[in-house]
Image: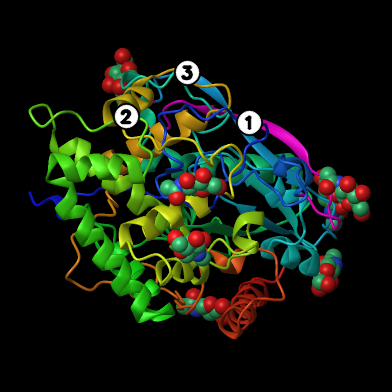
Amino acid sequence: MKLQNSIILFIVLLISYTKSINPKPRHIPQFVFGRPYGGFLNRPDGSNNEEDISCGSNNISYEEGWITQPLDHFDLNNTISWQQYYHYSFDLYNGSGLVFFMLGGETPLRARFICNTGYHWMVWAKQYGAAVFQIEHRYFGQSRPRVDQSVQNLQWFTPEQILEDYNDFIQQMNVKFFSNITKPRWVMFGGSYPGTLTAWMRTVYPDLTIGGIASSGAIGLTVNQYSYAVNMQKDYGSNDPNCASNIKAAFTQMQTMVYSETGRQVLEILFNLCTPFPSSDKLTPKDIQFFFSNIFGVFQGINQYTGDNGNTATANGLGIPITCQIMNNVSETDLVKRIANVINWSNSFSPGSQNVCMPNSYSDYIWTYKQPEYDTYAEIAAARSWNWMCCSYMGYFQTTDGGHDNDIWGRQDNLANNVTAMIINRNAHCADMYPSSPNDNMELIAARTRIQGLLEGFIQANKL
Ligand SMILES: *[C@@H]1O[C@H](CO)[C@@H](O)[C@H](O)[C@H]1NC(C)=O
Ligand SMILES: *[C@@H]1O[C@H](CO)[C@@H](O)[C@H](O)[C@H]1NC(C)=O
Ligand SMILES: *[C@@H]1O[C@H](CO)[C@@H](O)[C@H](O)[C@H]1NC(C)=O
Ligand SMILES: *[C@@H]1O[C@H](CO)[C@@H](O)[C@H](O)[C@H]1NC(C)=O
Ligand SMILES: *[C@@H]1O[C@H](CO)[C@@H](O)[C@H](O)[C@H]1NC(C)=O
Ligand SMILES: *[C@@H]1O[C@H](CO)[C@@H](O)[C@H](O)[C@H]1NC(C)=O
Ligand SMILES: *[C@@H]1O[C@H](CO)[C@@H](O)[C@H](O)[C@H]1NC(C)=O
């Protein structure tokens, strides 16, 4: 396998936040699966607990709940059950019988999505008088079907079980909260992987809900999802062709360097690697792939979230335009140094990440995700769970196998069954879901109007 063809990465949907400041293990890269470990916690005002203040000033209150779910929805002989965590609010509800439901994905449940009325599903809930619910996905956060995540205990982590959890949830909530409504009208929302789940739910249980909004949901999944990086390259190139060619030239140079002992020594210093590359006789392809995937991961994360209004970092410039300024910086003649400058700048958005060495030990990294125990904030467990999902079912490996063309977000297939697909050019992953910003471009504003029109269509077609 050629080196440049074997960089494997994963992504996670929304940039996520943690309730507390999680100490990041030293050997975990800054970006884990294209997302910063624990989220962007740093804020310009110096406070660093984004979750607590992210309800914003237009906040509403919400309640926490737990429902009992069977471990195995398909084996009636298995009587083991577990508690699934959810949030809900009736603050915006006006008796409409409308229920907006945000499906949980591959992170612990985040309160800000339900307490901050700036998120677009909340804007619409307010407008249409809907009750709102959001649920945590099994094997994430506090929703733990088994005491740990040993391989034995992950056997109930299947797409079928997950869809059945959400089906069960809607039915239980209908009994608990909407017994005074003849037919409660549920609309699902999901971004990224939960967007995929939204589409699957509409397919498998079409009568349970009146519609679904799947934002940036990956469809047509394949094991080798090289189209992801193909689109990344296009994004950098459409910002500035010179930027894309500088990135390419720098990576090509690093590929040459990594094949020689002296080249590797230069890279160790330039990137301030925590662990030197093993000596030539012990060096394995994994050591080299891990190094490249860590660097690639930064460019991936920057691309994926450019210009969204989802967190302090991206709202304050972490994105392609400044990355390209650094990559086009003629005062720095060494292209590889420019890459290091991008990483340094990107680190400056996360507290405690600047001037610390860059993790480079694949074996330490794997060791961490091999641990079956839940860690305190379930951040590592979340990454283990997502790995499980990708390796067992979804594939979705974001390799650099390019050369072909095959959009993942911007694809409009399967338009039967009343599915409307749209491409939102010049916008980040799931950008339509976040609060509005004065920087939103025309395409985003128009897309939100169109999505609302579809939502309105679901509601009109399903009168109480
Ligand atoms: C909710 O909004 C009010 C202002 O309207 C603010 O004082 C309060 O801190 C906000 N609460 C949260 C949890 O963000
Ligand atoms: C449940 O148990 C019964 C009786 O032992 C057995 O006949 C049946 O096959 C079991 N069902 C499953 C799904 O294992
Ligand atoms: C709730 O709000 C919506 C949107 O304003 C309105 O159409 C509806 O009549 C209201 N009340 C009920 C009971 O549906
Ligand atoms: C139905 O019950 C819910 C709470 O269970 C309440 O908030 C709502 O106002 C009731 N709606 C009607 C139309 O009575
Ligand atoms: C450009 O490169 C110079 C020389 O290395 C450096 O001092 C400066 O900070 C760089 N500027 C940017 C935007 O990267
Ligand atoms: C990163 O920036 C710091 C200053 O914030 C500087 O000391 C360090 O040398 C930089 N590292 C690289 C690789 O440019
Ligand atoms: C498709 O959805 C629209 C509402 O968005 C509805 O009016 C129409 O009846 C639906 N068509 C089918 C075939 O379900």
Say which mark, if any, is on residue 67.
Answer: 1
261 sits to left or right of 123: left
Ligand 3 lies in which image quarter? bottom right
Say which mark, if any, is on residue 275.
Answer: 2
Nearer the N terminus, badge 3 or badge 1?
1
Estimate the x, y position of residue 83 in percent, counting from the top left.
Answer: 59, 26
Nearer the N terminus, badge 3 or badge 2?
3
Residue at point 41%, 25% (across, down): 76
Label 2 secondary element: loop
Q: Is residue 56 magenta?
A: yes
Q: Give the distance between the C-alpha atoms of the residues marked 1 and 2, in whole angstroms.
A: 45 Å
Residue of label 3: 80
Residue at point 81%, 54% (across, down): 56
Q: Read off the magenta span.
A: 55-75
Q: Give the distance between the C-alpha atoms of the residues marked 3 and 1, in whole angstroms.
A: 14 Å
Disc 2 crowd, CA 10 A, few/some/many (<14, 14-19, 20+): some
Q: Is residue 12 visible?
A: no
456 sits to left or right of 389: right
Amino acid residing under circle 1? Ile
Disc 1 crowd, CA 10 A, few/some/many (<14, 14-19, 20+): some
Residue at point 40%, 52% (across, down): 340
Which quadrant would the C terminus be assigned to in this image?
A: bottom right
Pick the residue in front: 208 or 195. 195
Circles 3, 2 touching at the beta carbon (< 8 Å): no
Q: Given this view, does label 1 or label 2 mark the residue nearer the observer?
A: 2
Q: Is residue 271 visible?
A: yes
